[in-house]
Image: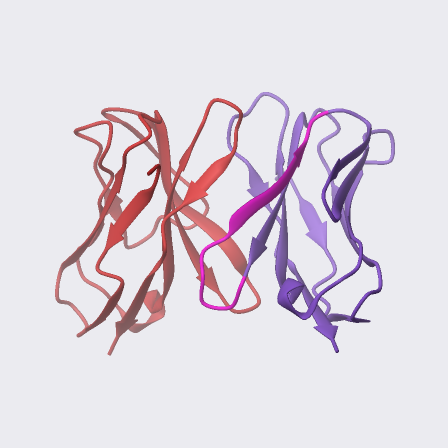
Chain colours: A purple, B red
Amino acid sequence: QKEVEQNSGPLSVPEGAIASLNCTYSDRGSQSFFWYRQYSGKSPELIMSIYSNGDKEDGRFTAQLNKASQYVSLLIRDSQPSDSATYLCAVTPGGSYIPTFGRGTSLIVHP
Amino acid sequence: EAQVTQNPRYLITVTGKKLTVTCSQNMNHEYMSWYRQDPGLGLRQIYYSMNVEVTDKGDVPEGYKVSRKEKRNFPLILESPSPNQTSLYFCASRDTGNTIYFGEGSWLTVV
């Protein structure tokens, strides 16, 4: 069973701070990694994808991948109350085209 | 607009009454899948389809059926719904980069 682990939270940060969300995965052969944001009662939406080691930045979001340590993280700079949501990590195991989702981390950004 | 459309969005039904949740995508994706999402359990895959006439079980297939007669459509069938199938259901399709696109979700209550 390919595992994707996330701390369920909630992670609470003040407005303007950096929110750091972490995800670990079990399959060392995994090749593609995704972060989805899900507002309560809504469908998940893709916010970042990353395929190689290092950092990938998109606006206030930075995804970080470390394949040797088998973790992927998402940093949200200048957090806003509108960032309050559940963040799902998804990992596509090696030899598969089917992503495995973590259970998500709840983020609360308070004014 | 590229989208995954599922219907109905909200349904209350009685135990044992067969129902079908339709799903259609307009992105010509080969891969489609169904998930259910329950509090504390995250997204769990029910069934998936790699292409027309090719379907396979996910993590929680019991009590569900699917069919894939056309590339764009992937209906989910509950032959005899039970209360433990009360959940939020998402249809999804996947592009060649392994990005998952979700429908808006279907809230199903079985009484």
Residue at image point 34% right, 69% down:
B86
Q: Quadrant of residue A105?
A: bottom right
Pinpoint residue A102: horizontal percent, then vertical percent: 63, 50
Pinpoint residue B24: horizontal percent, then vertical percent: 24, 40
Give the quadrant of the C terminus of chain A.
Answer: bottom right
A88 is within the stretch colored magenta: no
The correct choice, above or below, for A40 with respect to B90 in the image is below
A50 is within the stretch colored magenta: yes
Residue at image point 36% right, 49% down:
B103
Residue at image point 69% right, 64% down:
A8
> Which of the two residues, A27 or A90, is positioned nearer the viewer here?
A90
> Which of the two residues, A19 or A52, is positioned nearer the viewer here?
A19
Residues shaded magenta: A39-51
Instruction: Single out the residue that lies furthest toward the left.
Output: B17
Q: Is residue A92 left or right of residue A52?
A: left
The correct choice, above or below, for B39 with respect to B7 in the image is below
Pinpoint residue A3: horizontal percent, then vertical percent: 66, 43
Q: Quadrant of residue B56?
A: top left
The correct choice, above or below, for A14 with respect to B31 in the image is below
Q: Is residue B49 left or right of residue B20?
A: right
In this rendering, the count of numbered labels is 0
Residue at image point 76% right, 62% down:
A79
Pinpoint residue B27: horizontal percent, then vertical percent: 33, 30
